[in-house]
Image: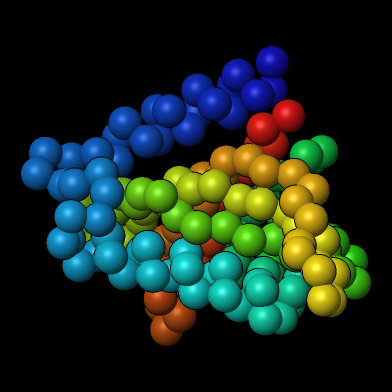
């Protein structure tokens, strides 16, 4: 039931974001391009700095929905994600599309993710794959920051 409610809420949000003349993906719109780049920078920071890189891209009041429960606030997100990125486990993702509200201060990205085990001298082992949506907001002095992150696995 929770997934249905959350999915319905997201669908309502997504429909409200698409405005006439606003592309639903990167078709040259500068704000859409900037949001896609922010998501790519988020992925690069996470690849480089693990849980710290992940948490740094969230707004102070950001929320994430891992497989179980809900994590509120950048500090709680950091605490939750530091162990998740320890050792040889990595999370990789790439946005597929982005939408930005006409106001230019709210948007979302959709994409695919993969969790891998990195083994030196051998090919990475895929542990899980899935899809995600990140809802972004502009934060004064910081630019785009993740307000809500939701992912689900393919299996």
Count of marks, rendered view = 0
Q: How is the image coloured?
A: rainbow
Question: In the figure, residue 42 lies in which quadrant?
Answer: bottom right
* In the image, farthest residue toward the top: 1
Name which residue lies at 30% across and 34% down.
Answer: 16
Left or right of 40: which side holds 28?
left
Question: In the figure, residue 151 lies in which quadrant?
Answer: top right
Is residue 119 visible in this depiction of the protein? yes
Left or right of 123: which side holds 150?
left
Q: Position of residue 106 (x, y in %)?
A: 36, 55
Name which residue lies at 69% across and 15% down.
Answer: 1
Left or right of 88: which side holds 25?
left
Q: Position of residue 56 (x, y in %)?
A: 63, 76
Identify which residue, 65 or 53, lies in the foreground: 53
Identify which residue, 109 or 113, lies in the foreground: 113
Name which residue lies at 79% across and 48% down.
Answer: 127
Is residue 135 visible in this depiction of the protein? no
Above or below, 115 relative to 46: above
Q: Quadrant of the C terminus?
A: top right
Above or below, 126 relative to 20: below
Above or below, 6 relative to 132: above
Q: Position of residue 44 (x, y in %)?
A: 57, 75
Identify which residue, 99 or 46, lies in the foreground: 46
Name which residue lies at 50% across and 22% down.
Answer: 8
Question: In the figure, residue 47 lies in which quadrant?
Answer: bottom right
Q: Position of residue 103 (x, y in %)?
A: 23, 56
């Amino acid at each position: 039931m929770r997934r249905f409610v959350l999915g319905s809420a997201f669908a309502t949000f997504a429909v409200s974001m698409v405005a006439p003349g606003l592309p639903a993906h990167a078709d040259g719109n500068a704000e859409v391009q900037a949001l896609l780049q922010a998501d790519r920078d988020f992925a690069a920071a996470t690849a480089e700095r693990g849980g710290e890189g992940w948490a740094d891209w969230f707004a102070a009041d950001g929320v994430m929905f891992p497989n179980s429960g809900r994590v509120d606030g950048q500090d709680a997100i950091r605490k939750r994600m530091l162990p998740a990125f320890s050792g040889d486990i990595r999370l990789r993702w790439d946005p597929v599309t982005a939408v930005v509200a006409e106001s230019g201060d709210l948007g979302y990205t959709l994409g695919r993710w993969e969790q891998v085990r990195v083994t030196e001298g051998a090919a990475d082992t895929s542990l899980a794959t899935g899809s995600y949506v990140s809802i972004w907001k502009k934060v004064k002095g910081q630019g785009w920051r993740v307000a809500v992150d939701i992912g689900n696995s393919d299996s």
